[in-house]
Amino acid sequence: MLNFTHDSTARSWIAAAQAPGCDFTLQNLPYGVFAPKGRLERSRGGVAIGDQVVDLAQLAASSLLPEPAQAACSVAAGETLNAFMGMGPAGWQPLRHALFRLLSAEADPATQAKVRVCLVPLVDAVMKMPAQVHNYTDFYTSVHHALNVGRVVRPENPLTPNFQWLPIAYHGRASSLVLSGTPFRRPNGQSRAAGSQTPVFGPSRRLDFELEMGFFVGPGTALGEPLSLTESRDRIFGMCLLNDWSARDHQFWEMDPLGPFLGKNFCTSISPWIVSMEALEPFRVPFGRSDGDPQPLPYLDNATDRATGSVDVQLEVLLQTRQHRARELPGDCISATSFRHQYWTVAQMLTQHTVGGCNVQSGDLMGTGTISGPTPGEAGALVELSLGGTRAVPLPGTGEMRHFLEDGDCVVLRGWCENPGAARVGFGECRGEVLPSINLNAM
Amino acid sequence: MLNFTHDSTARSWIAAAQAPGCDFTLQNLPYGVFAPKGRLERSRGGVAIGDQVVDLAQLAASSLLPEPAQAACSVAAGETLNAFMGMGPAGWQPLRHALFRLLSAEADPATQAKVRVCLVPLVDAVMKMPAQVHNYTDFYTSVHHALNVGRVVRPENPLTPNFQWLPIAYHGRASSLVLSGTPFRRPNGQSRAAGSQTPVFGPSRRLDFELEMGFFVGPGTALGEPLSLTESRDRIFGMCLLNDWSARDHQFWEMDPLGPFLGKNFCTSISPWIVSMEALEPFRVPFGRSDGDPQPLPYLDNATDRATGSVDVQLEVLLQTRQHRARELPGDCISATSFRHQYWTVAQMLTQHTVGGCNVQSGDLMGTGTISGPTPGEAGALVELSLGGTRAVPLPGTGEMRHFLEDGDCVVLRGWCENPGAARVGFGECRGEVLPSINLNAM
């Protein structure tokens, strides 16, 4: 449902919010947790607008908000957003609407002056994990990704028979979730070369990224309490960008029969700003299935989800090597696609997660799985772009080539929504750099 | 290394600790978290002895403990044991040794009188989760289980090639961990009958238990910090019993290619008392591998682990149906085995978990995977005992039969260590009951 916060003609008195290509428009208002530079012990909730962050702790201490936005702001001002996520739409919507009014160019000058006191420049905000993620689940919902990878590892049967019937998922590792900008070491592990009987131990030689989005669970559920598709839609707080770094050589050796483990759990990166589902409302699109695909079972199907279950988030992957940085180049775009192509929707994912009785908690993070579109240039991982490491991916900016990631490589994910009737809503970026592995000969 | 707390001739002034078959002897002293009946808001750490619990909050407030045991007791007295687990052996050993002295029959009468004030009868202790488990991992380390299940689902290739090279594991769901005694509903989910093209949705018809043990991680690690096998041994706080309830029909339909998800995450039960690794020291045995098995890679191998990496914990599974309860029968023992048969040791599991850089946190729980011994009667799950549901398991006490669990069935796991040179050390029990599924036709 669209409302006044989706009015594309509305402008903010913060000029940068109207700059071309700005992700953090008045119509966006994404949530994060930050600490002002020099006061790093003081983490609090914030909302990005243009080149500024609204400090929600400061705002809560002002007398600018009506109830119930004031109560919601006090909760969102905490050291994590878990409690705010747990409030549900009854907390989320009043605060978002009140912030929109305060930041709109229609706010009177006295109000603007009072809000200005609550602003921290984005460049002075040190971003923190937005929530304490107690449980992290990663789905596998792109049919194009499943087919691309399936052709590499199971050419005789690339798509498993369950794919079109349920959103496949596995539990990920919550402890190794990190915020964009955190580098990580190339993992050590076991792999076995094709044709060899014996595995070897050492640094991954097939290190990869995975272009994903993540979504945060709002109000939790009790054990044994399933969520219908309608309920799930209202329980999702918002979305971010997610990079599910993967060591393909370790993963493919270890994953039969219980799935990925060390091949994934060394690091997963997320972007710091969570874009609310309300901000994404103008970009809702039908789910990414074709006419010939089987009808989902009734618990995974309703008219709303069919018509507007997906979101058209445009996504791109930049690869920046040491050579790019030495030449002050931004990196090369090696993939571009949209979230709209996913086979399953976020509501279907959350319903599937709870249908057997598994409880979810406020702040749980769910990854969508790698997002790959229908054409080769839309693949969301190097293992797909390089056809399993058999074809080098060119980097025109430096003339380098890549089959997999090398030390010093930095992967930057970007995402944004644009359409003619709406203001741009962007996610910022999710960035991570590969550091060399540590030497484990001493172990 | 054995010390005075392993002296099998030592006796406690609490008479019940010497009763035949008592799990909670002076040589055991397992840790848990409890609230005294009628004061349920006051959870605190406790130590079981005979038919009593030592209230560690009360003990910490007494002047009975020398340092550093006093400091450790204050930490262990908290609402969870996470912080105490994080202290490592430098906190664990002094407290255990001081408790042993206070509870020994050699303690002077004045001391006994002061300790007596800190006791709560076990029957008046409401047990709580011993730790806030941020991350739960389940391994797959019984070669007999892997072969038994493999013959059902992959007869042409029952043991995957990686099994003998690394302790296979997957991430489990931390939110649905429950304490022994908590019933759960039969899960709903998708399954597909053999030969059918289309799955169906409904209550699991192949609900199973899994006999496992769990171990808790002591001091955590930083991202990128691997633990050697020697380090891992010192980082494990203690062990409990664990039942990894499994819906086989849902699991086998969903798990290709990313592993179990809804088939497992509806509930996992643990026993309330954590037996310290020090208490298990007299029962250490060589790891359960055969001469013909491949030598582990160097990072998973050392002489200590080879000689004493496993533990001889005797285990049994009781199945108690509604009919057993109606006749006041305890249930029938349907499986009995020992933890000593596991192919991989707990230290190998923890080292494998960290070797790629994944960080662990104090209070993380790791399951060992189903524990099945070498003979058919030692299988740790119904899917094995019933040969994939093709042969009924008899329950002599009532004359009933089971292929899988029925509503009202209660599964009780028990574990204990006994050998001629040591006092008995037991785990108590891990109990759970299957409630009927909820009707999801309305969804």
Image (tube, coloured by chain):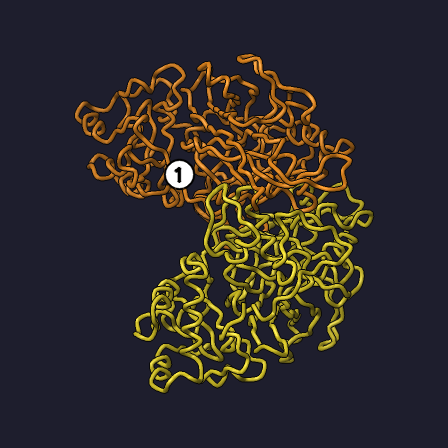
Chain colours: A yellow, B orange
- Tell me what residue is drawn at x 53 percent, y 45 percent: A226
Circle 1 crowding by C-alpha within 10 Å: few under 14, some 14–19, many from 20:
many
Q: Position of residue B402 (x, y in %)?
A: 61, 21
Q: Residue furthest left?
A: B110
- The quarter of the rendered structure image containing the N terminus of chain B is top left
Residue B297 visible to an observer of this rendering: no
Q: Position of residue A185 (x, y in %)?
A: 58, 59
Determine the chain carrying the residue at label 1: B
- Tell me what residue is drawn at x 51 percent, y 58 percent: A234
B220 left or right of A429 in image: left
Residue under pointer 1: B130
**Is disc 1 placed on a helix, strand or loop?**
loop
Position of residue B165 relative to residue B100, above or below, is below
Numbered-mark total: 1
Q: Position of residue A107 (x, y in %)?
A: 40, 83
Q: Quadrant of residue B229?
A: top right
Q: Quadrant of residue B35?
A: top left
A362 left or right of B406 in image: left
Position of residue B286 relative to residue A345, above or below, is above
A109 left or right of B351 in image: left
Three-letter code for the amino acid on which mark 1 is drawn: Pro
Residue A145 visible to an observer of this rendering: yes
The residue closer to the viewer here, B15 or B433, is B433
- Tell me what residue is drawn at x 36 percent, y 33 percent: B127
Position of residue A267 relative to residue B315, above or below, is below
The residue closer to the viewer here, B288 or A315, is A315
The residue closer to the viewer here, B305 or B337, is B337
Q: Quadrant of residue B290?
A: top right
- Tell me what residue is drawn at x 61 percent, y 26 percent: B404
